Image (tube, grey):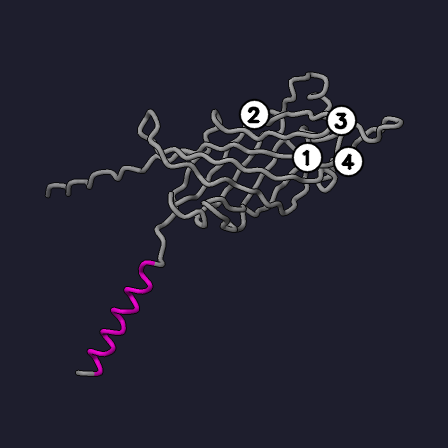
Amino acid sequence: MKRFSSLLAAAVFAAAVIAPSVSAAADTWQIDPAHSAAQFSVTHLMISTVRGEFGAMSGTLEYDGKDVSSIKADVTIDATSITTRNEYRDKDLKSDHFFDVAKFPTLTFKSKKVVPGKAGAFQLVGDLTMHGVTKEVTLDVTAPSKIIKGMRGESRVGASASTKLNRQDFGLTFNAAVEGVGAVVSDTVAITIDLEAMFTPTVAAPPTAPAKK
């Protein structure tokens, strides 16, 4: 009996220690395309910055609302939505000189791990697929905003991410040279992603009354 009591006490102690470390399941948040965008910038003629953006983005985030380590991202960007506010340049970017959107209409990012940082900021490591090429990239992400209630009662949260990549790594190799200047467009591309995501809890349906016999 004494041995049983000792084993029971040990089991209770282990449960007390282990239980707090088990995190609640993360919720699935939907990216709000109306309030999210992916912007990019490159250097033109090595003297000025040209900016553009992809206006159409969709996907999901897994997040428990507290721990950034719970975050997982699955994002799709519509390559055909690219704009730099210049029709001629946009047409060139959509052509096989660059993104070849007829063949590769989307860009995707799927996260693989989170590296926590200071003051709630973190790095999100994942696979970016662009122009048919998949490479691992690391996004520097700001601490998520506090969760607020939207106009329809849904929960909302926001964050921004940034990184730099070499477009040559993704097969975007087209360029031209100007005598005495060099490349027309830089290989380094700076990327900023602004996300707003929303979550609406699922309301359980009331139990069905048993059928009368």
Q: Earlier in the sequence, mark 2 or mark 3?
A: 3
Q: Which residue is mark 1?
A: 189
Around disc 2, counting alpha carbons within 10 Å, would you say few (fewer than 14), some (14 to 19), or many (20 or more)?
some
Q: Secondary structure at mark 4?
A: loop
Q: Is residue 179 left or right of residue 185?
A: right
**Residue type (three-letter) at the residue carrying disc 2:** Gly
Q: Earlier in the sequence, mark 4 or mark 3?
A: 3
Around disc 3, counting alpha carbons within 10 Å, would you say few (fewer than 14), some (14 to 19), or many (20 or more)?
few
The stretch drawn in magenta includes residue 19: yes
Q: Earlier in the sequence, mark 1 or mark 3?
A: 3
Front residue of 183/201: it is 183
Please give the count of numbered marks on the rendered protein: 4
Q: Position of residue 81 (x, y in %)?
A: 60, 24
Q: Secondary structure at mark 1?
A: strand
Q: Which mark, residue 181?
A: none
Q: Earlier in the sequence, mark 2 or mark 1?
A: 2
Nearer the camera: disc 4 or disc 3: 3
Q: Which mark, residue 47?
A: 3
Q: Residue at x 23, y 73 (%)?
A: 9
For the C terminus, the image quarter is top left
Residue furthest bottom as drawn: 2
Whether pointer 4 and pointer 1 mark residues with C-beta atoms closer than 8 Å, the reply is no
**Residue type (three-letter) at the residue carrying disc 4:** Thr
Q: Which residue is mark 2?
A: 55
Residue furthest front as drawn: 119
Span of residues in magenta: 3-20
What's the CA distance linking mark 4 and mark 3? 20 Å
Whether pointer 4 and pointer 2 mark residues with C-beta atoms closer than 8 Å, the reply is no
